[in-house]
Amino acid sequence: MPEITFLGHSCFLIEEAETRLLIDPFLTGNPKAARGAGDVDPTHILLTHGHADHLGDTVAIAKRTGAPVVAIVELANEISGELGDDHQVLDPNIGGTVRFDWGWVKLTPAWHTAVTPSGTPHTPAGLLINIGGRTIYHLGDTALFSDLQLVARRGDKVDVALVCIGGHYTMDRYDAVTAVEFVQPRKVIPCHYDTFPPIETDAQAFKSDAEGQTDAEVVVLQPGQSHTP
């Protein structure tokens, strides 16, 4: 059964047996980061998009650990150019699934914008992850949109949804409640809030609203805390 550790902002570490999935490793420069870039040892790096607060330390960590990177095709091409041809960078597009011996990752739509710090435009994504008999859905940086309902109807019940709630750059905690209604997960872990003043919000109020209006249990993690679904 996977263990999910919140490392701050939108960064999570998902561990199952010998597999360690690192999502959106914005650690250097992140005032809420629970670990430094040199303190993580992922077997795989998964990206929702390439804004600086998500791409973060990807290249440095990948070079140090040799971890393959999964990112949408245009972002993957930029990363591959930095890492070199010998480093595995997997480049699905929206709707594409990458399979591993531990499970799979599927890219889903997310309503947002994205250009890397180097200037590469690309489409943001959510990450639907199947590992250790659990399906974990990182919604990425997204606004509320009705097609989030389609994930719940796909056939794989979402065990844990990692949901942005900070507002300003993504949906806020009120829209996030509706997103939870759409996705219908068993559990929710909020993210992308309180890192900077524009995205400060009340995670406990979100928990109260979401648990009052949906069947999901909301688990509010402080950076560095873990949860096993």
Image (tube, rainbow, N blue to C red):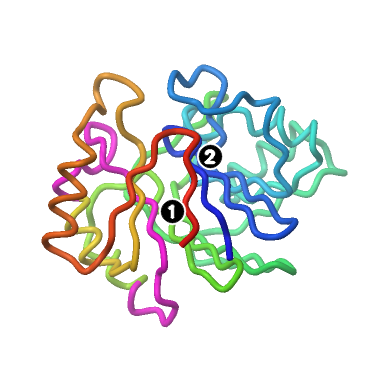
Q: Please state if 192 lies on the left or on the right of 211 as rendered.
A: right
**Is the residue under label 1 in contact with that under label 2 (CB below 8 Å)?**
yes
Residue 209, position in %: x, y? 13, 52
The amino acid type found where label 1 is placed reads His
Residue 138 shows which numbered tag?
A: 1
Seen as rendered, the residue at the extreme right is 86
Vertical placement of residue 193 versus 144, above or below: above
The amino acid type found where label 2 is placed reads Asp
Q: Is residue 3 magenta?
A: no
The foreground one among 229 and 185 is: 229
**For the point 15% across and 50% down, which residue is it?**
208
The foreground one among 130 and 53 is: 130
The foreground one among 118 and 16 is: 16
**For the point 34% across and 61% down, which residue is it?**
187
The foreground one among 212 and 173 is: 212
| Bounds of the magenta segment | 152-175
Q: Please state if 54 lies on the left or on the right of 139 as rendered.
A: right
Q: Is residue 160 magenta?
A: yes
- Neighbour class for label 1 at 10 Å: few (<14), some, many (≥20)? many
Residue 24 shows which numbered tag?
A: 2
Residue 152, position in %: x, y? 33, 74
Q: Please state if 13 lies on the left or on the right of 17 as rendered.
A: left
